[in-house]
Image (cartoon, helix red, strand yellow):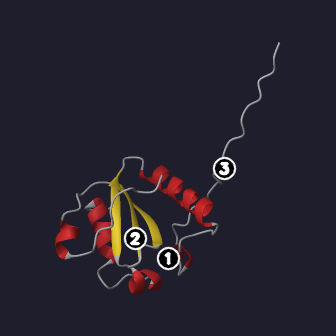
Amino acid sequence: MPIRKPWIQPSEDSIRAIPAVVGVYEIADAEGNLLYIGQAGGREPFGLRTRIALHFGGADPNAVLRERAAQFRWEANQQYTTKRLEMLMQFQRDEGVEWPPAHSAGDWRDTPQLGRLRRSESIQRSSG
């Protein structure tokens, strides 16, 4: 469920190359450690481009992102809210912690209530 694209280094050209579409994105530090899972919806004037640019402009209100954000990747997705929730639940299951570091830092109004991902148990068939 995570985005399976290579990380992109932020630059004026790489930000400008992001299409003005809705979707999800991930931000990581220089070593590739995931810091944040975000989404860009229809209220963003240029979708993903606007949201991702905000994190690399030097004025991000989140101290973790301001100090450690070094790369990003994105995925256009019309079901961006559902996709982001799935990505956050997968992170919780795989990493064993509640939130990526930037989600835990600061005053976030977008921390959704999540369910838990787990493997379904096989269904036993009864004979007869």
Residue type at mark 2 is Ile
Quadrant of res 45:
bottom left
The answer for how far apart the CA atoms under marks 2 and 1 are is 9 Å
Count up the numbered dots.
Answer: 3
- Discs 2, 1 touching: Cβ within 8 Å: yes
User: Which quadrant does the C terminus fall into?
Assistant: top right
Q: In front: 121, or 24?
A: 121
Per the rendering, the mark at residue 11 is none
Judging by the rendered image, the residue that carries numbered circle 2 is 27
* Image height of 110 relative to 42, above or below: below
Mark 2: few/some/many CA within 10 Å (<14, 14-19, 20+): many
Quadrant of res 10:
bottom left
From the viewer's perspective, tell me whether residue 80 is left or right of residue 51.
right
Judging by the rendered image, the residue that carries numbered circle 1 is 102
Per the rendering, the mark at residue 118 is 3
- Residue 41 makes an appearance in the image: no
The answer for how far apart the CA atoms under marks 3 and 1 are is 24 Å
Residue type at mark 1 is Ala
* Image height of 96 relative to 105, above or below: above
Residue drawn at 38 percent across, 79 percent down: 30
* Image height of 44 relative to 62, above or below: above
Residue drawn at 57 percent across, 62 percent down: 112
SS label for mark 1: helix
